[in-house]
Amino acid sequence: MLRRKPTRLELKLDDIEEFESIRKDLETRKKQKEDVDVVGGSDGEGAIGLSSDPKGREQMINDRIGYKPQPKPNNRSSQFGSFEF
């Protein structure tokens, strides 16, 4: 394998300005999200996640990740296919 000299990277003023603008944008989004969390948490929404009800907690997690479980049928044909007995 051939070795080559390291590539020199130069930081330009435009790059710095772009970085600063993106960082400020992310900080404002984070503050807005925190404000929404604080307002949402005051009406009891956060207390649901701490409840001891396992079904409610499981439902909340399923809603958060977008999982919609389908109930399983409890008959023999669903378990063993279409075998004839």
Image: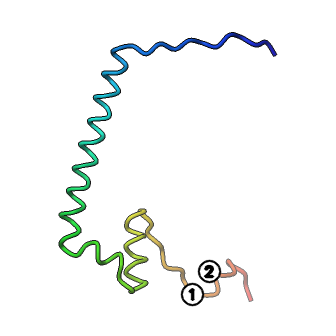
Q: Residue at 28% across / 72% down in the picture?
A: 46
Helix, strand or loop at mark 2: helix
Percent of width and height locating residue 5: 68, 10
| Dot 1 crowding, Cα within 10 Å, few <14, some 14–19, many 20+ | few
Identify whether 16 is placed above or below 53.
Answer: above
Q: 69 or 7, which is in the foreground?
A: 7
Q: Secondary structure at mark 1?
A: loop
Instruction: Say which quarter of the image contains residue 73.
Output: bottom right
Q: Are marks 1 and 2 in contact (CB under 8 Å)?
A: yes
Q: Is residue 28 above or below residue 85?
A: above
Residue 68 located left or right of residue 2: left
- Indicate the amino acid at tag 1: Asn
* Residue 22 rendering spot, x and y as whole percentages: 31, 32
Q: Position of residue 37 (x, y in %)?
A: 25, 61
Please name the colour scheme applied to the rendered image.
rainbow
CA distance separating discs 1 and 2: 7 Å
Q: Which quarter of the figure has residue 49?
A: bottom left
Residue placed farthest to the right in the image? 1
Q: Identify the image quadrant of the N terminus.
A: top right
Identified by mark 2, the residue type is: Ser
Q: Where is mark 2, residue-wise?
A: 78
Q: How many marks?
A: 2
- Residue 75: x, y in percent? 59, 87
Q: Which residue is mark 1?
A: 74
Up the image or down, 61 lies above or below 85; here it is above
Point out the image quarter for the C terminus: bottom right
- Please report the residue visible at 35 percent of the width from the left and 27 percent of the height from the top: 19
Residue located 21% across and 58% down the image: 36
Q: Does residue 81 appear left or right of residue 65 in this picture?
A: right
